[in-house]
Amino acid sequence: MKLQLLSDLHLETETFEPEPAPGAELLVLAGDIDSSWRGLARFAGWPVPVIFVPGNHEFDGRDLAQAELDLRAECERLGMRMLHRECVVITAADGRRMRFVGVTRWSDFDLFGAAQRPRAMRAAAYFMRVMDARRFGLPLGAEGVREEGLACRAWLERALAERPLDRWDKTVVVTHFAPSLRSGDPRYGKQPGTAGFCNADDDLLPLADLWLHGHLHCRHDYRVDRPGRLAGRVVCQARGLAGKGEHLGFEPLKVIEI
């Protein structure tokens, strides 16, 4: 299957016109497309199916639970499939069945271990204030994000523990938050704040044939060793902010094959 991956377009402030990648059979949107949601309409009527996994900014200024319901309804109206703690099997042009496992996968702040968790959560406080989201009627803070992250991790573990039983041929995981420090932004390195962007899901990486993510405003494409099996692959195809030069090197028409 040939995929096009886009994330972190930030169409609420950025000027960017998405185009279908020649030869792609599916478009995957890995979050932070438009915090206002208006930009999602650009993908209505897309020539191939569209899968969308929400990013953190899709919840800006909103209650998490209500936003998930409203965003799902908006995606249905636009003719795209939203995945958050959900799986869907799509048949590729060659007849193979591809299972897509989608979840936002909020940060649990354990990237550098439990001892460093408090520092990581303090570093995230600024972003929580900017996000201005709510959970259970209260402002969403780092503790709430961690609880969401742990719930996402538990769901992901269960989903990846399922065996195909001839129901699918390949597994593609789509998250917004990154699954490994290997996806960290080289501009910032191993700072406490990096734990708000990457999770320590390295133990889950071998369970996916392909893992797609966003959130980091940089690009990654690396292999995951799987002894006795073909290597897995992790790809981030985020655009980022042009004002910071983060769009340089972005390949919007890149096709990813699995």
Image (cartoon, helix red, strand yellow):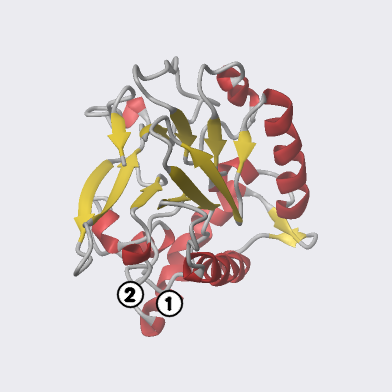
Amino acid type at image mark 1: Arg
Note whether residue 31 is visible.
Answer: no
Compared to residue 141, the image places residue 29 above or below, namely: above
Please name whichever residue, 92 or 113, is drawn nearer the observer in this view of the structure: 92
The residue tagged 1 is 117
Across and down, in percent, residue 110 comes to 41, 74
Compared to residue 121, the image places residue 174 above or below, namely: above
Across and down, in percent, residue 70 comes to 76, 40
Instruction: Give the residue at x 64% y 30%.
Output: 37
Q: Residue 136 lies in what quarter of the image?
A: bottom right
Few, some or many residues within 10 Å of mark 1 (<14, 14–19, 20+): some
Disc sitting over residue 112 in the figure: 2
- Left or right side of 67 for 17: left
Compared to residue 225, the image places residue 169 above or below, namely: above
Across and down, in percent, residue 238 comes to 36, 37
Instruction: Give the residue at x 23% y 66%.
Output: 226
Across and down, in percent, residue 115 comes to 38, 85
Disc sitting over residue 80 in the figure: none
Q: State the SS at label 2.
A: loop
Note whether residue 64 is visible.
Answer: yes
Instruction: Give the residue at x 44% y 18%.
Output: 18
- Left or right side of 246 for 126: right
Q: State the SS at label 1.
A: helix
Query: Mark 1 or 2 closer to N-term?
Result: 2
Q: CA distance from mark 1 to mark 2?
A: 7 Å
Few, some or many residues within 10 Å of mark 2 (<14, 14–19, 20+): some
Instruction: Give the residue at x 23% y 63%.
Output: 229
Please name whichever residue, 169 or 5, is drawn nearer the observer in this view of the structure: 169
Amino acid type at image mark 2: Phe
- Left or right side of 232 for 9: right
Marks 1,2: beta carbons within 8 A: yes
Task: Name the quadrant of the N terminus.
Answer: top left
